[in-house]
C-alpha cells in the first residue's frame, strides 16, 4: 500500500516542485484514508519537461495532508494546480479495506423488500440524472459542439455528456435488474 510521502505540497505551491514546468502527464495514487466515510489521501506524480518525476502528497492550504471526499475532488484539486494537463491516470490503493462483508439475512423476504426499495430510490434519482445529461447534450448540440468544425475542447465536452448519459443509462439498467431480482424473491415469499 502507498504511504503519505515526505514531500508535501499545497495546491498553490505544487507547481514550484517542477519549477513551474511539466510535460502534461500526472499520475494520482488515491489512498483510502477512512474506509467508513470513503475519504482519500492523494499522492501526485508529475513528470517534468526532462521526463524526471516529482512526487508529493497533496495538502490543504494550511499544510495538513488533505483528505479528499471522493476521486472527483482529487481531480479538481489537480486541475486547480496545473493548467496544461494532457494525461491524468489514477489508481486507488487500499480498496480491500472498503469491501463489505456479506452477512446472510435472517429474514430474506424483509431483506428483499428493503433492497428493492433502495434500488427503486436509486433508479428514480437516475431518471433525473439522465434527464440532466440529455439536457446538457441537447444544449451542446444546439450550440454546435458536436460539429467536427467546433473547437476540440467543445467536442470533448459534448462527448463527455454523451458518455455520462450512456453510463447513467447502464447503471439504471443494473438497478432495474436488481429490482427484478428482489421482486422475484418477494414473489416466492
Image (spheres, helix red, strand yellow):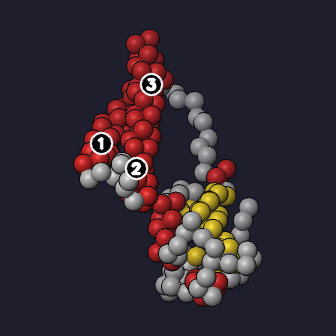
Rounded to the nearest angstrom, the CA distance separating label 2 from label 3 is: 37 Å
| Labels 2 and 3: the sequence-earlier one | 2
Q: Return the residue nearer the eye: 26 or 107.
A: 26
Residue 6 lies in quadrant: bottom right
Instruction: Residue at 39%, 59% (x, y): give it.
Output: 151
Res 132 visible: no
Instruction: Residue at 71%, 70% (x, y): give it.
Output: 3
Q: Residues within 10 Å of mark 1 (few under 14, many from 20)?
A: some
The quarter in which the N terminus is drawn is bottom right
Read off the residue under disc 1: 134
Rounded to the nearest angstrom, the CA distance separating label 3 from label 1 is: 23 Å
| Labels 3 and 1: the sequence-earlier one | 1
Residue 116 lies in quadrant: top left
- In this rendering, the answer to whether 15 lies above or below 2 is below
Rounded to the nearest angstrom, the CA distance separating label 2 from label 1 is: 20 Å
Direction from residue 124 to residue 5 in the image, left or right: right
User: Can you give x and y, in whole percent of width and height, for residue 53 in the image?
Assistant: 72, 75
Please tell me whether mark 2 sits on a helix, a strand or a loop.
loop
Read off the residue under disc 2: 148
Res 17 visible: yes
Please tell me whether mark 3 sits on a helix, a strand or a loop.
helix
Instruction: Residue at 45%, 25% (x, y): give it.
Output: 177
Foreground disc of the pair 2, 3: 2
- In this rendering, the answer to whether 94 lies above or below 14 is above
User: Can you give x and y, in whole percent of width and height, for residue 84 in the image?
Assistant: 53, 73
User: Can you give x and y, in whole percent of width and height, for residue 159 in the image?
Assistant: 42, 48
Foreground disc of the pair 3, 1: 1
Please tell me whether mark 1 sits on a helix, a strand or a loop.
helix
Instruction: Residue at 59%, 62% (x, y): give it.
Output: 88
The quarter in which the C terminus is drawn is top left
Question: Is the C-beta separation of discs 2 and 1 under 8 Å?
Answer: no
Read off the residue under disc 3: 177
Amino acid at each position: 500500500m502507498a504511504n503519505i510521502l515526505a514531500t508535501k505540497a499545497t495546491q498553490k505551491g505544487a507547481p514550484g516542485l517542477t519549477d513551474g514546468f511539466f510535460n502534461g502527464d500526472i499520475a494520482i495514487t488515491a489512498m483510502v484514508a477512512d474506509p467508513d466515510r470513503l475519504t482519500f489521501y492523494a499522492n501526485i506524480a508529475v513528470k517534468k519537461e526532462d521526463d524526471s518525476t516529482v512526487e508529493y502528497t497533496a495538502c490543504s492550504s494550511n499544510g495538513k495532508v488533505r483528505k479528499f471526499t471522493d476521486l472527483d475532488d482529487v481531480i479538481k484539486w489537480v486541475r486547480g494546480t496545473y493548467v496544461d494537463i494532457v494525461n491524468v491516470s489514477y489508481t486507488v490503493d487500499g480498496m480491500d479495506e472498503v469491501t463489505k462483508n456479506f452477512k446472510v439475512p435472517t429474514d430474506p423476504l424483509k431483506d428483499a423488500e428493503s433492497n428493492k426499495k433502495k434500488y427503486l430510490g436509486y433508479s428514480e434519482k437516475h431518471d433525473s440524472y439522465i434527464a440532466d445529461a440529455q439536457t446538457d447534450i441537447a444544449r451542446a448540440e444546439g450550440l454546435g459542439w458536436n460539429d467536427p468544425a467546433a473547437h476540440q475542447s467543445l467536442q470533448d465536452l459534448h462527448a463527455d455528456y454523451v458518455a455520462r448519459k450512456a453510463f447513467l443509462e447502464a447503471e439504471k439498467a443494473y438497478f432495474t435488474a436488481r429490482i427484478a431480482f428482489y421482486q422475484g424473491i418477494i414473489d416466492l415469499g
